[in-house]
Amino acid sequence: MKTAEIMAKLQAKYPGENEYLQAVQEVLESIEDVYNQHPEFEKAKIVERIVEPDRIFTFRVTWVDDKGEVQTNLGYRIQFNSAIGPYKGGLRFHKAVTPSMLKFLGFEQTFKNALTTLPMGGAKGGSDFDPVGKSDDEIMRFCQAFMLELWNCIGPDQDVPAGDVGVGGREIGYLYGMYKKLARQYNTGVLTGKGGTWGGSVLRPEATGFGALYLTQHILNHAGKSIEGKTVTLSGFGNVAWGAATKAVQLGAKVVAISGPDGVCHIPDGITKEMIDYMLVMRASNRNKVEDMAVKFPDKAHFTAGKKSWSIPCDIALPSAFQNELSEDDAKELVANGCWCCCEISNMGCQPGAIHYFQSHGIIFAPGKAVNAGGVATSGLEMTQNATHISWSGQEVDDKLHYIMSSIHEQCVKFGTQPDGTVDYVKGANIAGFMKVAQAMLEQGTI
Ligand code: GLU
């Protein structure tokens, strides 16, 4: 297998699908050497098969807004790979959603889910519906219309969607309500990220951020460092940034920046519990403005329009908003200001130039598919609780999440340790995830 040859074919076949091509290139570059030591992979054309989704559903979603006007969006579900378990992955509602974006996310999800140690295949879905400025009623009507098309493509042993950007507990509630009405079954395991009184796992809302900080702790410990007393910058102010801020503060770090599409809030003395709570209010408002934090806490947070979190000096940068949110120039600015570690919590949050800059300047870097896997892992724990009709305590779920993140770290070390003793977490995560899925595909034959 030669990455360049496969990429040339994919570029010709899918011109303009830039995010998808970027995600595939990164994985193929990481696995090329190991793959070529396994002639059985080459014979079964594992790479040619693994880069293509199993199937893509595209559907029209028509709904009525508060003014009584009819609106039409596109909805998608990409069932990427089911070699190691039922399709599993979130739904993203964002105006920039395209099939390319969801293909990259479904591809990443396949390897991420393999890293969690749980039996979950990879999928992703969503819509170009823009939640910004929408009322609660509009969100509900959209979710109901979306589920009207999706419901018979999903099921607890078939495909289990969850949240992602623009889809949180509220949206999962509306989606489940409609699913239940259509399927006429109380099939709680069909969606994860549900409410705590109707099948949701305790700690699922926090899990992506908590898991990310647990993995960051392992990475720092392995490098002989600790997170206590360090300054941390986060991007975004949604569910992921909220969970990460909560855990970072619990572990003794100081979170000095959060951001939004409108700019950055610098918090020189570190984010407080009241401010973390207020992030939830900001998300529920659908305004998508981080400036609201500075308006609410004028003595603590200073807003600068048009700037990113990466302009604020820190020890550890945690991108937690959107793909490609951290460019090579941002990486240079971070490093010039003293940053020495970047753990990507968003999916593919760093551009390839940024990753290369970090790695070639001795900055510790870990990729999203390892760092943010605690979210989908806890979804997997929710599926187990639903299938066995029991609920675990917060302590039980947290212990399992700890175990999973520590196992992800071990897999990265196993496959990513370099001759000089440092760990290439990109390589480690990609090879570990790939080997598991590829082996399962091989054993299941040519299908
Ligand atoms: N959207 C999250 C992710 O990117 C969670 C998916 C899930 O829980 O299924 O992994």
Image (cartoon, grey):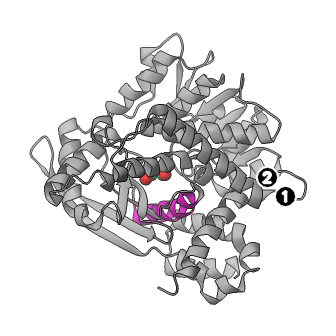
Q: Position of residue 351 (x, y in %)?
A: 63, 54
Label of residue 423 in the image = 2
Label of residue 418 in the image = 1
382 relative position to 1: left or right: left
Q: Dot 2 lies on which element? A: loop
Residue 131 painted magenta: no
Residue 103 in the image: above or below residue 328: below
Could you tell me if residue 320 is visible in this image?
Answer: no
Q: Residue at x 48, y 12 (%)?
A: 298
Q: CA distance from mark 2 to mark 1?
A: 6 Å
Q: Amino acid at mark 2?
A: Val
Say which label, 2 or 1, has the lower sequence index.
Answer: 1
Residue 36 found in image quarter: bottom right
- Does the magenta stretch mainly form a helix, a strand or a loop? helix
Bounds of the magenta span?
A: 98-114
Residue 96 found in image quarter: bottom left
Q: Position of residue 426 (x, y in %)?
A: 70, 57
Q: Position of residue 260 (x, y in %)?
A: 48, 35
Residue with the most extreme left position: 68
Residue 102 painted magenta: yes
Could you tell me if residue 367 is visible in this image?
Answer: yes
- Answer few, some or many: residues within 10 Å of disc 1's Cα (few below 14, many 20 plus, some between 14 and 19): few
Residue 431 found in image quarter: bottom right
Foreground of the two, 404 or 262: 404
Q: Residue at x 47, y 61 (%)?
A: 120
Determine whether label 2 and label 1 are within 8 Å by CB. Answer: yes
Q: Position of residue 389 (x, y in %)?
A: 33, 47
Foreground of the two, 124 or 236: 124
Residue 347 in the image: above or below residue 289: below
Q: Dot 1 lies on which element? A: loop
Q: Amino acid at mark 1?
A: Gln
